[in-house]
Amino acid sequence: MSLPLPQTVKGDSASERLRTLGLELPVLAGNAYYVHHRAVGSSIHISGQLPYKDGELLGQGVVGRDVELETAKDLARHAALNCLAAAVRAVGDLDRVRIVQMLVFVASASDFGLQSQVANAASELLIEVLGENGRHARTAIGVAGLPLNTPVEIQMICTEV
């Protein structure tokens, strides 16, 4: 049985598709200890991003114990949006971003096995906004804990198109 593929949202540009979804790229706060992105050759490495919105961490806890699956999916979409903001800082325009690889960390209860479903929400957002440039290689990993007790953290590798 094949699964339906996520579809690109209608719109001429990635920025228009983002607006159609009712979203905008956030402003990322600076950090004294790391940068949000680093270019190495043609690759852009995006630091792990948490589900912040307007400077506020949107959730805490362990998925499958304190945090429901649907909430974790929403948090993953916010973390992916923050990754896109970092990528745009690197290349200057959302239409020039291509996602190569995404690594999704899910703070999970030991018996929670749906990390890939949490990651699917972030993957779907990337494809809705970037179309084919949003399709990527991916790994979803369950971990015992994440910074600030967040349920989700996402790291990416991108390239400029």
Image: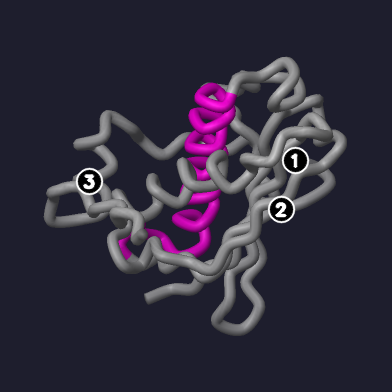
User: Residue at position x 37%, y 76% from top?
Assistant: 161
Q: Residue at 64% across / 43% down in the picture?
A: 115
Identify the magenta region: 69-95
Q: Nearer the viewer, mark 3 or mark 2?
A: 3
Instruction: Give the prevailing secondary structure in the magenta stretch.
Output: helix
| Residue 122 image offset from top left, x and y in percent | 48, 45
Q: Is residue 96 above or below residue 21?
A: below
Assess whether mark 1 and mark 2 are in contact (beta carbons under 8 angstroms): yes
* Viewer-side residue, 62 vs 147: 62
Q: Residues under labels 3 and 2: Cα distance?
A: 27 Å
Residue 77, placed above or below residue 154: above
Q: Position of residue 96 (x, y in %)?
A: 35, 67
Q: Mark 1, mark 3: which one is toward the viewer?
A: 3
Instruction: Give the alpha-carbon distance from disc 2 to disc 1, as whole Å.
Output: 7 Å
Indicate the quadrant containing the N terminus: top left, top right, bottom left or bottom right. bottom left
Nearer-the-camera pick, 47 or 4 = 4
- In this rendering, does residue 29 appear at all? yes
Res. 46 in view: no
Looking at the image, residue 120 sits to the left or right of residue 148; the answer is left
- Residue at 46% x, 41% y is 121
Mark 3 — residue? 17
The structure's colour scheme is one colour
Q: Earlier in the sequence, mark 1 or mark 3?
A: 3
Task: Give amino acid for label 1.
Answer: Asn
* Rendering quarter of residue 127: bottom left
- Circle 1 sits on which residue? 31
